[in-house]
Image: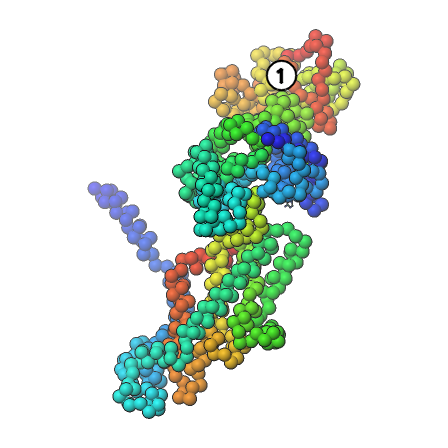
Amino acid sequence: MSAIHLDSIRKSFGETPVLKNIDLSIRAGEFLTLVGPSGCGKSTLLRILAGLEAPSAGSVSIGDRVVNGVRPANRNLAMVFQSYALYPHLSIEDNMMTPLRLRDLSTAGRLPWIGPLLAREKYREMRRQVEETARVLRIEPLLQRKPGQLSGGQRQRAALGRAMVRKPVAFLMDEPLSNLDAALRIHMRSELAELHRSLKTTFVYVTHDQAEALTMSDRMAVMMDGDILQLGAPDEIYNNPQDIRVAEFVGAPKINLLPGVIDSAGQARCGDVVLSRVGVGAASEKVTIGLRPEHLELAGGDEKGSLTGRLVHRENLGADLYLHLSVQDGAHRMVVRTAPHEIGRVSIGDDVRFVRKRGEAMVFGADGKRIRLSETPAAAVPEVA
Amino acid sequence: MTDMTLSSSAPSSTARADGYRFSVGETLKHAVLILGALVVLLPFYVMVSYSLKSPAEIMQNTGGFFGAQEAFRDEYCVKLGKDVADCMVTPVIYNYTTAFQKAPLLRYLLNGVIVTASIFFIQVLVALPCAYALAKLRFWGREAVFGLVLFCLLIPVHAIALPLYIMLAKLGLTNTYAALVIPWSISVFGIFLMRQFFMTVPDDLIDAARMDGMSEFSIIWNVMLPTAVPALLAFAIFSVVAHWNDYFWPRIVITGDRSLFTPPLGLREFKGDADGDNFGPMMATATIIVAPLIVAFLIAQRRFIEGITLSGMK
Ligand SMILES: Nc1ncnc2c1ncn2[C@@H]1O[C@H](COP(=O)(O)OP(=O)(O)O)[C@@H](O)[C@H]1O
Ligand SMILES: [Mg+2]
């Protein structure tokens, strides 16, 4: 197994820069997700890694070998495409056999009819590998069918199978679940994660769906406009985003953002409500305060530091109930998570009071970067809520 | 009671009205189409009918479609000094045997097959890589090259026939199969048609093939060709029909050697004979020449139509 390194990768199509100086080290055996809104250059980065696209600058290395000039097939990577890209005229078995045939057979052995006779031993071995992979993926009964005769989920497995048979250094997957229906997509998440655990091979997974990134990956890289904004474990990305764009992108429903200022005491406040403490030296700076829906709770009475909003929509997901509130006379929308039993009899149009749970708020400066919280103990500054 | 009968009869009566509704528009459309079909089919009707009738029936326009099939005297046979009784022939048999005897029609048919098949084969050999490059590879000047392809579509062959002939003559290639095949080996129409089709093939499929280790040429023959079968069929129709029926070009480059005649050239054998216009055998030849195309069409009718609609839509 080998690690993969991308060093100062740049890519432009014509005049438009698509990737701006990307550095990324992928550890051997990890499940790394590239996540970001569509058009941010994830696929381009993956294709550069695969060798399907040449970078404008920078180097790609697999293990210790720089592979910039190496043809895609010789990088020993396998790719799963969003559209599956199975050969429509070949049976699933032949589809899965193709990469092996091209890698292991001589020109003579690839000839139709005569080939299987010349290289009988190799064909037997290849067929054994195909069958073994098919068993792992539970697609044995489908081997003789054409891709057109399969459902989306089955095609997905067949495409995975074609990638798996060659035992690559890493699997590259470009939105492999996007063409599946919602239920199957969620099912496949856990299945892919299990597959990764059993194969112990590197997975580089591209998606625009932050939920997939959070649920499946060991580490995720959040990309935006051709840059990697933050790279880290899903927990870290979710709980500790370093950039306001990361905070906004990750998490559903989205994080609530309120404009605020830092007062002389070093507290971030929105209006007269103190929401967080921040480090010193940033007084009166304009900031944005981020509060995730689960960091808010309904206030019992007229508690100090509580905010009021008018209920405009309630979204009941069974276990959770999301209240959409319009605050500051409709200037902002906030979402508060509660449990259905907590809310009682609130109806649309009513005023709801809610407070921040202790210690949970993120403050971002005017440049969108996170402002570090001060380490001073709670007693030093009169804390609210 | 009345309610029940009403409700039970209502659906069936509307269904009937749906099935047999008379529509002026539809009737008019069909009338026009039938008229068009008649105009197109009439020459074929005459061709087949003449190939069955005796010269007298053809001249006097009698005998309906099949003719009376009464034996008549073959004047040519009599001229050769044979006994009159031996020279009595049935029209159908006479027409078709003469067609095969007076000219080596089987040879012409074989030539037709050799020429059209080689032309189509070479055209595909050239057009697929060109179309693939124009549709899927990024290179400098691609749009300009495609513009040239479109431009070439506008040049009629008759305009360049003379220079082509002179070139072939200088190379000493007139009166060879090569002269019949070479000028058609690059079909811009084929390149254009296949390029349009390849544009619809997803890039992912090609990238997958590259990841699997196929070379670009291998992608053309092992991935693009199998997916392009419907488009190739459409192209095959255009190519084979055009070159099987071509009279103009073989007439120019095949000047002496009758063993290189293609079927349409064979038709000429019956024109301006010493013994007048021999319409019966001539129409028999014509029938034999068009038969292979018609039979091929009937066999592969569904796929032909699929192919044509495909080329028309995309
Ligand atoms: N072959 C290409 N030619 C020109 N622009 C391209 C090409 N491929 C991608 N792009 C552009 O690069 C940007 C990033 O594309 P992509 O990597 O596919 O985004 P993502 O996969 O994150 O949605 C897009 O704006 C897209 O228009
Ligand atoms: Mg993409």
Q: Is residue A364 above or below residue B131?
A: above
Q: Is residue A171 visible?
A: yes
Residue lying at 66% horizontally and 28% vertically, measured from the top left: A230
| Coordinates of residue A207 in the picture (x, y in percent) | 58, 34
Q: Residues within 10 Å of mark 1 (few under 14, many from 20)?
A: many
Q: Is residue A176 above or below residue B137?
A: above
Q: Chain letter for mark 1, please.
A: A
Residue lying at 53% horizontally and 47% vertically, measured from the top left: A106
Asked which quadrant contains residue A79, the reply is top right
Q: Is residue A330 visible?
A: no
Residue lying at 47% horizontally and 59% vertically, measured from the top left: B233
**B153 relative to B87 in the view: left or right:** right
| Coordinates of residue B141 in the picture (x, y in percent) | 67, 56
Which amino acid, by three-letter code, is at mark 1?
Arg
The foreground one among A87 and A188 is A87
Quadrant that contains the N terminus of chain A: top right
Residue lying at 51% horizontally and 62% vertically, measured from the top left: B121
Q: Of all residues shown, which one is farthest toward the right? A: A281
**B99 relative to B67 in the view: left or right:** right
Q: Is residue B9 above or below residue A219?
A: below
| Coordinates of residue A71 in the picture (x, y in percent) | 62, 44
Q: Which residue is mark 1?
A: A356
Q: Of all residues shown, which one is farthest toward the top? A: A379
| Coordinates of residue B98 in the picture (x, y in percent) | 36, 80
Q: Is residue B263 above or below residue A102?
A: below
The foreground one among B253 and B71 is B253
Asked which quadrant contains residue B49, the reply is bottom left
The foreground one among B236 and A5 is A5
Q: Element under label 1? A: strand
Q: Quadrant of ligand 1?
A: top right
Quadrant that contains the C terminus of chain A: top right
